[in-house]
C-alpha cells in the first residue's frame, strides 16, 4: 500500500512513504565527518572505510522521503527512536531506505505515527533498521502547550 499521494500526517498502518536512495562517496563521507568533527580511522581509511552510523540515521528520517509533505504551519516532531545496527555500511556504497507506517495512535489529543525505516545496501544486505515515533502539531493539530 502506498501513501505517496497522502499528506504525511494522514498515513495509516501499512501505508508507505516513497523510498529514498543515496550514494555515499568518499567526498560525501569526508564532508559529513568534518561537520560532526569525528575523524576516527574506521571512517577514513581505505576501501574498508565505514559510513558514520549517524549519517545513516540522518538519511533514514521520514522527512527525507521524496513524498513527505505537510500543510503549511504543521510540524512533525520526533518523540521516540529505536535504531538496530545489523552491519556496517561501506563508503562507496548506495543505500536504499523504505519507510512504512507500522502503528498509529492518539495520546492527549495528538496523533502519533510509528515509522519503520530499514536501510539496506545495493546488495540488499541490512545495515540498520530505524523505528521512529512522530507526532504532529500546528495546522489541524493542537499546538505545544495548548
Image: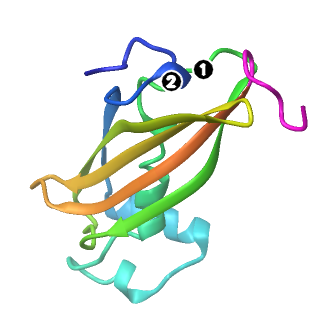
Q: Is residue 97 visible?
A: yes
Dot 2 or dot 1: first in sequence order is 2
Across and down, in percent, residue 133 comes to: 54, 46
User: Would you name the residue on which mark 2 appears?
Assistant: 8
Q: Is residue 139 magenta?
A: yes
Most common secondary structure along the magenta stretch: loop
Magenta residues (range): 138-146
Viewer-side residue, 108 vs 145? 108
Residue extending farthest to the right is 145
Q: Residue at x 40, y 11 (%)?
A: 5
> In the image, 64: left or right of 109?
left
Q: Which quarter shows the N terminus?
A: top left
Q: Is residue 44 visible?
A: no
How was this image coloured? rainbow
Q: Is residue 127 magenta?
A: no
Q: Residue at x 45, y 58 (%)?
A: 57
Across and down, in percent, residue 122 comes to: 14, 52
Q: Are marks 2 and 1 in contact (CB under 8 Å)?
A: yes
Residue 125 appears in which quarter of the rendering?
bottom left
Residue 48 appears in which quarter of the rendering?
bottom left
Q: Residue at x 31, y 58 (%)?
A: 25
User: Would you name the residue on which mark 1 appears?
Assistant: 70
Q: Residue at x 39, y 88 (%)?
A: 41
Q: Dot 2, how many residues are within 10 Å of its Cα: few (below 14), some (14-19), or many (20+)?
A: many
Viewer-side residue, 10 vs 40? 10
Residue 106 appears in which quarter of the rendering?
top right
Amino acid at each position: 500500500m502506498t501513501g505517496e499521494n497522502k499528506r504525511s500526517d494522514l498515513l495509516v498502518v501499512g501505508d508507505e512513504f516513497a523510498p529514498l536512495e543515496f550514494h555515499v562517496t568518499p567526498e560525501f563521507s569526508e564532508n559529513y565527518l568534518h561537520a560532526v568533527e569525528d575523524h576516527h580511522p574506521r571512517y577514513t581509511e581505505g576501501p574498508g572505510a565505514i559510513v558514520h552510523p549517524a549519517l545513516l540515521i540522518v538519511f533514514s528520517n521520514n522527512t527525507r522521503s521524496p513524498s513527505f509533505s505537510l500543510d503549511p504551519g504543521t510540524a512533525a516532531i520526533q518523540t521516540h527512536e529505536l535504531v538496530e545496527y545489523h552491519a556496517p555500511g561501506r563508503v562507496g556504497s548506495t543505500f536504499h531506505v523504505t519507510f512504512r507506517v507500522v502503528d498509529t495512535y492518539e495520546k492527549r489529543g495528538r496523533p502519533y505515527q510509528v515509522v519503520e525505516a530499514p536501510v539496506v545496501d545495493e546488495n540488499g544486505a541490512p545495515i540498520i533498521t530505524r523505528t521512529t515515533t512522530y507526532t504532529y502539531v500546528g495546522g489541524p493539530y493542537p499546538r505545544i502547550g495548548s
